[in-house]
Image (cartoon, helix red, strand yellow):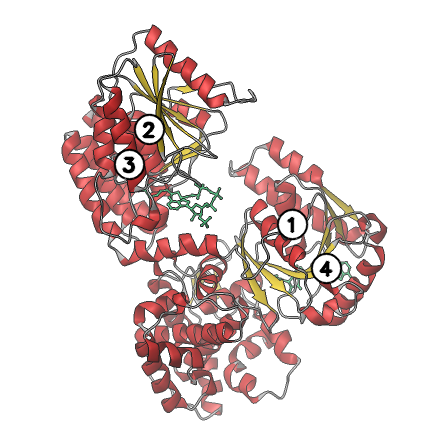
Amino acid sequence: MSVVDYEIRNQIGIVRLNNPPVNALSQALRAGILAAVERAQTDESRAILIICEGRTFVAGADISEFNQPPVLPTLPDVVAGIEQSQKPVIAALHGTALGGGLELALACHYRCALPSAKVGLPEVKLGLLPGAGGTQYLPRLAGVEAALELITSGNPVSAQRAHTLGVIDAVLDDEKSPVTPLDNAAIAYAQTLLSQSAPLRRVRDIEIPPDTVSENYFHKAREQLARRYRGQPAPQLIADCIQAAVEKPIDAGLALERMHFERCLHSSESAAMRHLFFAERQCTKVVGLAKDVTAKPVRSVGIIGGGTMGGGIAMNFANAGIPVRMLEINDEAMARGLAIVQRNYAASVKKGRLTQESMDRAMACIQGTTDYAELSQVDLVIEAVFENLEIKQQVFRKLDEVCKPGAILASNTSYQDLDAIAAVTRRPEDVIGLHFFSPANVMKLLEVVRGAQTSDSVLATAMQLARAIGKVPVLSRVCYGFIGNRMLNQYFRQAHLCLMEGATPAQIDGAMESWGMAMGPLAVGDLSGLDIGYKARQAEPDNPDHQRVYCLPDALVEMGRLGQKTGAGYYRYDPETRAREEDAEVLALARKLAAERGVTPRSLSDEEIRNRLLLALVNEGARILEEGVAQRASDIDVVYANGYGFPRYRGGPMYFADQLGGEAVLVRLRGLYAETGDPCWKPAALIESLAATGKNFTDEVMA
Ligand code: 3HC
Ligand code: NAI
């Protein structure tokens, strides 16, 4: 079968697309569709049906072609070709009709879909806007407000919702038919249209009444979008295009859309977001894992510890319909843990993000227990008890005793040595780290930590399971803090050094937030609780670096200022709004502590703060790669974009370094090293070698 086949069945010319895995609109596919539609104009067919093989209708333009010079026909050429057909063209959707795929369908005169299909225009997630009519056609069908929300959020909607919005004309109901269900139902739909002499209905001909939205609607929308998508040009340009759809003839709107699309396509923001798109798919692949390694089925899960993390982790599995047994030290702790889970779900129901029915179904999946015997048959156990090696080892000894052979034993530890945990069991090959991020039911990142003896099938299971529960898994080897927190420690350390040297918390956080970080480092400290770092440092009371660098947070903790939870930390928090305010007491304390350590305050520029914090991430990231802790540089970018609020439109720390270039990174690191003598600035050998060879981090794949 070629990428596009054509046949006539029952007077319907069937254009069948077959470009696995997702029928992306490669040049061959575009040319094939256009040729088939042209051919159908002169044959005996009476209508044309565009239908896809495989798991989905067209999932969009071929993103891998975006870095290459354009080749004709373009997608707008294909759209125009379909639209001008003298016979009705019908799109039959299944799977996900996304981006250019939905635009292809919008060019057709009619659209039908299986009930399980989803449609959307997700271009904004790649720093783009729809480039083949989406911004002009969707408001004509769904109305301006719905179209703006769909295109700026990029989130797909169900076939049913799309039908309600007028985007799809018919939801087919023949999904259960065992053989080619879509073919049969779609051909029947096409024949019904023919029997009704359905007209050639072109979306472009629909008029949008000029008064469809209020006078300052677009002004307000742009303001909201600016807040929601800080630093991203595409959402603003989408608003421009939809405004043009209302105010201008369609061809003017299409021309504007094309111009803005080209502009976004060549923007640094889109290049970074496309990098992450592929990185998030690449990271699921374990280098060197034999093809025949199969994942084990995970049909039930045990969780030890129903605290902040345990409860959130349980929700992930319950949401996927996997039953969970959550074990706590006593009934009281158990009831507390379950109540938190219940509250989290109830909050989602209140916000309209979840139905009561889904909540009840999920809650029914989570059972509390205090008895290890109830975990004897589960396929996977995740330990999330206090961050203490002895306690974790005790738990694993117990699990080793009670769990069935072959059960996977996982730890959610942030810092403990996974191999020391595995060593207390008789089955270290079944032990793995599954490091969720807080809040565990929300954050996408999952660091999968491979112990020295973790078996390949346990690894494969973890990677597959992560995707099944909607996580983005990144593989890490064992080291202190794994990938994310190990780098973060260097980033935080620089933030604290800047504080000691004379910057204020608001300046440091402001410098990073205006650059795009979701939250500055000190505000993050206040959010997670300053007592966490304090306790960790207590284990090393004589470390001079701690006393020099972290004297301020330690003093704050001793004053009872633990961060947001006590209403004060580096900042003071408004009890109602939780808004942070700079606190003169903290500034004075910082100056006093610095003076006691012989530091004369100076003024630091935002540029210096950013340079130091980001280079600290990059240099540590390079060491992580050198040591083989991460498999590839792009995995580190995935960690930062999904777990640490790194702006997606900057691609991640290693991508950022690649944009600067190895030579420039090296020069900056050498400068900081010469100036401070601080070993943290000694350039990683990998950076020296990249600078020498002119290669990029993202070219490097480590074993
Ligand atoms: N172009 C090129 N490759 C694509 C692709 C695309 N649009 N969409 C997916 N792929 C590739 C992936 O890279 C992956 O490759 P790999 O196996 O080598 O890693 C493979 O297809 C399978 O993808 P997933 O692992 O993501 O498969 P899932 O089944 O989990 O998800 C999907 C399928 C929902 C379609 C998801 O892949 C997706 O969201 N794709 C992107 C959709 C998109 O952004 N479309 C808009 C593109 S821009 C556009 O259309 C511009 C137009 O307006 C002009
Ligand atoms: P927490 O203190 O909120 O919860 C721990 C729970 O474990 C408590 O409810 C406690 O009663 C229970 N527990 C303690 N010992 C137990 C035992 N022997 N058997 C059964 N239950 C026991 O702690 P949190 O924050 O949930 O952390 C748990 C683990 O997750 C730690 O290893 C931590 O490092 C890790 N982690 C925490 C993150 C966070 O942001 N809080 C993020 C990522 C990982």
Disc 1 beta carbon < 8 A from ligand 1? no
Along the viewing direction, whichever of 612 and 53 lies nearer the viewer: 53
Marks 2 and 3, the one that precedes in the sequence: 3
Q: Name the residue beneath numbered marker 4.
A: 430
Image quadrant in which you'd find residue 109: top left
Along the viewing direction, whichever of 658 and 127 lies nearer the viewer: 658
Q: Position of residue 559 (x, y in %)?
A: 58, 75
Give the distance between the C-alpha atoms of the residues marked 3 and 4, in whole angstroms: 48 Å
In the shown orientation, is residue 482 left or right of residue 114?
right
Residue drawn at the location 23% of the way across and 39% of the way down: 74
Residue drawn at the location 41% of the way across and 16% of the way down: 187
Q: Are the residues flagged by discs 2 and 3 in contact, CB closer than 8 Å?
A: no
Kind of residue at disc 4: Asp
Q: Residue 30, labelled with which disc? A: 3
Marks 4 and 2, the one that precedes in the sequence: 2
Give the distance between the C-alpha atoms of the residues marked 2 and 3, in whole angstroms: 13 Å
Along the viewing direction, whichever of 219 and 613 lies nearer the viewer: 613
> How many numbered marks are there?
4
Disc 3 beta carbon < 8 A from ligand 1? no
